[in-house]
Image (tube, grey):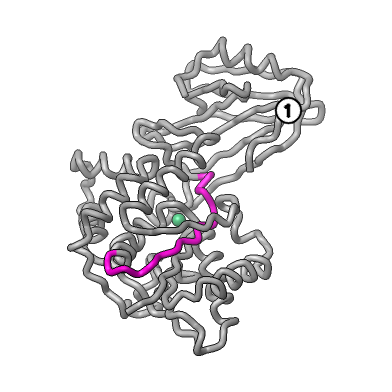
Amino acid sequence: MNTINKSSVQSALDSFLNREVYLHLETTNGAYAVHTQQSNMSVGAYIRNGRISFGRGVITGDGPYRVGLKLELGWVYAEGLTDFEITPEGQLLLAGHDQEGRLAVALELSLSPFKL
Amino acid sequence: MEQHVLVVFPHPDDETFGCGGTIAQFAKSGVPVTYICATMGQMGRNMGKPFFATRESLPNVREAELAEACQAIGIQQVINLGLRDKTVEFEDPELLTDRIEQILREIRPSLVLTHYPGYAVHPDHNALGEVTIRAISRLSVQDRPVVYAHAFSHDSLDVLGPPDIVNDITALSDLKLAAIRAHKSQSQGILARIAKGQFAEQSFESSFSHLLESESFWTYNFS
Ligand SMILES: [Zn+2]
């Protein structure tokens, strides 16, 4: 992954417009957050292979970045994104890493299902 | 003398951090060790430091790391159950119990290492430990392997009492450290912080050196 280049990510988002796409969305502070006393709650959520279609998708901010995808009936939103990669299969991977290099948030789009 | 050790954990690296020295000890004395690893740790948060894995490459990265770690501590066979990280507790426990029972009947281990259900912090650890105990309790008493249960929740000492197995692994610490290093994506952050002496709280560093000195287990009581 590389540090987010806003215009590259924006054109990647545009390439998914109005298509059936598979979404991976997650955020986490780690299953050990309470155990290691970094937090009083372990919080996380993920969607793997949600199928969506969006007519508008925008990256904003000056880093860390935010992404919003406007669906016919709702929204997909992520903040804290720092790094991106476009895989050889054309998947767009966006992630937010903390100072320790740990993943805290991820938003990924693909035209074919993500591996289980 | 054990005849066959079966290790059952959900994530690549559980075998190393929790009982790498003990496994190395058995392997060195010629006991075959089989590892049922339920997931590939697909949802791990650590990506290396500096990070080199992505959410999508992580399972392949961890599979390769696991192979290297297994070589270091002497695990000869890995059975990957193909489950997904963080989902073990949501699977049908009957089906999981059946699969583990089937492996138990094939391998006929004399000793099983697994997480102590309820005392192993991560929901995957507790869920897999529980189905493993269930599968073993289906065996007739004379066929049941001994179970060394690994517990590390903060209340384990209070509730379970002191562990009855305290295994000195200092002679095997090099092998365990090699396996920890093999799990690069998971250990680089911790090792870097230790090298820099960044752990102001002495407890962490001493718990790390403890990690290389002894491993503790509670023998599971089936009655
Ligand atoms: Zn684990």
Q: Does the magenta stretch include residue B33?
A: yes
- Position above or below: A91 against A44: above
SS class, disc 1: strand
Identify which residue, A68 or B152, lies in the foreground. Answer: B152
Q: Residue B8: x percent and y percent?
A: 48, 64
Crowd around label 1: few <14 · some 14–19 · many ≥20 (10 Å)? many
- Position above or below: A21 against A18: below
Q: Residue B10: x percent and y percent?
A: 50, 58
State the image quarter where residue B159 is shown. bottom left
Q: Write down the region rendered in magenta.
A: B28-43
- Position above or below: A70 against B32: above
Total numbered labels:
1
Q: Where does label 1 land, which residue? A: A21
The residue at the point 66 percent across, 60 percent down is B91
Judged from the image, the quadrant occupied by ligand 1 is: bottom left
Q: Residue B170: x percent and y percent?
A: 18, 63
Identify which residue, B135 or B202, lies in the foreground. Answer: B135
**Quadrant for the N terminus of chain B in the image:** bottom left
Q: Could you tell me which chain the residue with mark 1 belongs to?
A: A
Q: Is residue A67 left or right of residue B191?
A: right
The residue at the point 22 percent across, 60 percent down is B172
Does residue B162 show up?
no
Q: What residue type is labelled 1?
A: Val
The residue at the point 63 percent across, 43 percent down is A116
Q: In this view, does B138 lie to the left or right of B191?
A: right
* Residue that extends furthest to the front in the rendered view of this protein: B30
Q: Is residue B207 magenta?
A: no
Q: Is residue B163 left or right of residue B91?
A: left
Identify which residue, A65 or B33, lies in the foreground. Answer: B33
* Residue that extends furthest to the right in the rendered view of this protein: A72
The residue at the point 62 percent across, 67 percent down is B99
- Position above or below: B98 against B78: below
